Amino acid sequence: MPNTPQAGPPAPGARFAQQLKKGALEMLVLQLLAGRPSHGYELIQRLRAGSGGLLDLKEGTLYPILYRLEDDGCITSAWQDLGAGGARRTPRKVYTITAAGRAVLGEEKAAWQAFAACVNTLCKEDAP
Amino acid sequence: MPNTPQAGPPAPGARFAQQLKKGALEMLVLQLLAGRPSHGYELIQRLRAGSGGLLDLKEGTLYPILYRLEDDGCITSAWQDLGAGGARRTPRKVYTITAAGRAVLGEEKAAWQAFAACVNTLCKEDAP
DNA sequence: GCTTTATATTTAGTTATGCTAAGTATTATA
DNA sequence: TATAATACTTAGCATAACTAAATATAAAGC
């Protein structure tokens, strides 16, 4: 296996962008599901498309978020009915936001806005 | 020791706000030091005041960030000269941002703005 | 029929980073 | 000489995103 791309630590910029996601991803998944129910794979595509490629989640990132949200009662899941004679597809689990999930989403959006406003303020003003 | 306040897991809202900080704190510390050099304890106060209390770091949170930034060459540190006959204080280490640190800060601010814009867009539009 | 590709879910193990909590040390004040 | 305020250090934990691989079905090409 010649020329294996050197693993090493990620570039500073990449590591920073990665850390920024923490916490916000959960809110964004809830936000997408508030629009309409989706299965996991579709959520990855919607997130990638809706963010201009900035949020390109791997399965190993998204599914644990979904399981956590389901454990917390924020979403429910159901295996999609594949129908009897219709066009068959690989089985997929469809996630739907609950009333509790919508409440949590509201809180998280408020917290996000407060946090973002705070960061933007600190980034603009001169050394207080 | 009666009535020890039950530790338990933090409230959902608290956990969310906590996670949001990840990654952004490093940028904010650099931003404060870009304004003027400070020692650790002062940075905690500046952050708390500048954020309206939202960012209330413990020493155990800030100092590891400073050590990391120094290891990366983004800041330098020097024990403050306490002077010979002046008003004596407890020894303090003053941190100063480097040219490399200013460059990193610029990248991180750009990454933050891109990320925040992306999140805000996703939070507004209807299910794409 | 067999292989490849795209779709789709699951899970094991690693890493990064903020947290709690405690310890060390100096100076000023009572 | 206690006590509090200041100031830095460090050990160990929790969370959450990451890498990477395993599993499985259906469609398309040969």
Image (cartoon, coloured by chain):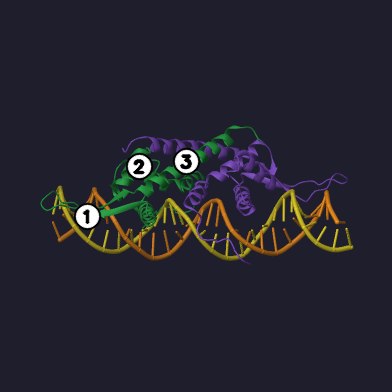
Chain colours: A purple, B green, C yellow, D orange
3 vs 1, front mark? 3
3 vs 2, front mark? 3
Badge 3: residue crowd in 10 Å (few <14, some 14–19, many ≥20): few
- Disc 1 with disc 2 on a shared chain: yes
Chain on which label 3 sits: B
Q: Quadrant of the N terminus of chain A?
A: bottom right
Which residue is denoted by mark 2 in the rendering? Answer: B48
Please provide percent x and percent y for residue C18. Answer: 43, 51
Between residues B12 and A61, which one lies in front from this camera angle? A61
Can residue A98 be seen here? The reply is: no
Can residue A9 be seen here? The reply is: yes
Amino acid type, residue under disc 1 in the picture: Pro
Amino acid type, residue under disc 2 in the picture: Arg
Badge 1: residue crowd in 10 Å (few <14, some 14–19, many ≥20): few
Q: Earlier in the sequence, mark 3 or mark 1?
A: 1
1 vs 2, front mark? 1
Which residue is denoted by mark 1 in the rendering? Answer: B91
Residue C10 lies left or right of residue B56; in this view the side is right
- Residue at 22% across, 54% down: B91
Q: Quadrant of the C terminus of chain A?
A: top left
Q: Earlier in the sequence, mark 1 or mark 2?
A: 2
Residue at the top extreme?
A: B125
Tags 3 and 1 touching, CB below 8 Å: no
Q: How many marks?
A: 3
Q: CA distance from mark 1 to mark 2?
A: 22 Å
Amino acid type, residue under disc 3 in the picture: Ala
- Residue at 38% across, 49% down: B100
Which residue is denoted by mark 3 in the rendering? Answer: B110
Q: Is residue C28 placed above or below C25 in the rendered structure?
A: above
Between residues A42 and A71, which one lies in front from this camera angle? A42
Chain on which label 2 sits: B
